[in-house]
Amino acid sequence: MTAADEQTYARGLYDAVIGSTLTTLQAVAPKLAQATGPLEALQTQIDAALPPNTPATIRNFLLVLARDGMLEQLPQVLQAFEQFGAGAVMLTRAEVLSAVPLSGEQQERVRQQLQEQYQTPLDLYFRVDETIIGGLIIRVGDQVVDNSLRTRLNNVQRGMLAS
């Protein structure tokens, strides 16, 4: 499975979980708009409003709102939740291999160049691999840019053997 495939499935899972949660809460909000009384009464009203097989996390969330006296604010909370979710970003994994540790300044320069090139938020890791002799190997998602000295030497050797 490629990193792009992983991102696709992850986005699908995120949308399914968040979408179903949001749909459930939006359906329950009007039913709970007039909910009043002590916590025990609110708990009964929440249980009555929720569809069967509702995940416990949704029930618990509503109980926290009720306990904190914020149940009537559910529509505003849902609106903020939608905005929060719209800003959620899936990170693309990126890895930079170098023969020697890169300085903080070098890492930041590489980070900026990759951000500009890929135009997507990156989950960037730097690792040392002495076997590459020099240069960098950069993996972003399922793409690999191999600018290592080891690869360049191998290419020269292949060229000489092919002649």
Image (cartoon, helix red, strand yellow):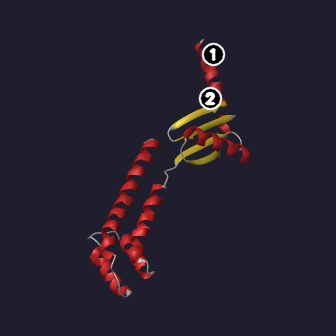
Disc number at residue 151?
2
User: Can residue 70 be spotted in the picture?
Assistant: yes
Residue in the picture at 51% in, 42% down: 141
Q: Position of residue 36 (x, y in %)?
A: 35, 84
Q: Is mark 1 on a helix, strand or loop?
A: helix
* Type of amino acid under label 2: Thr
| Front residue of this view, candidates 11 and 3 | 11
For disc 1, the neighbor class at 10 Å (few under 14, some 14 to 19, many from 20) is few
Q: Where is residue 62 in the image (x, y as percent from the top left)?
A: 39, 75
Please tell me which of labels 2 and 1 falls first in the chain: 2
Outermost residue on the top side: it is: 163
User: Can residue 103 be spotted in the picture?
Assistant: no
Residue 73 vs 90, above or below: the answer is: below
Disc number at residue 44?
none
Q: Name the residue under label 1.
A: 160
Residue in the picture at 64% in, 44% down: 111
* Type of amino acid under label 1: Met
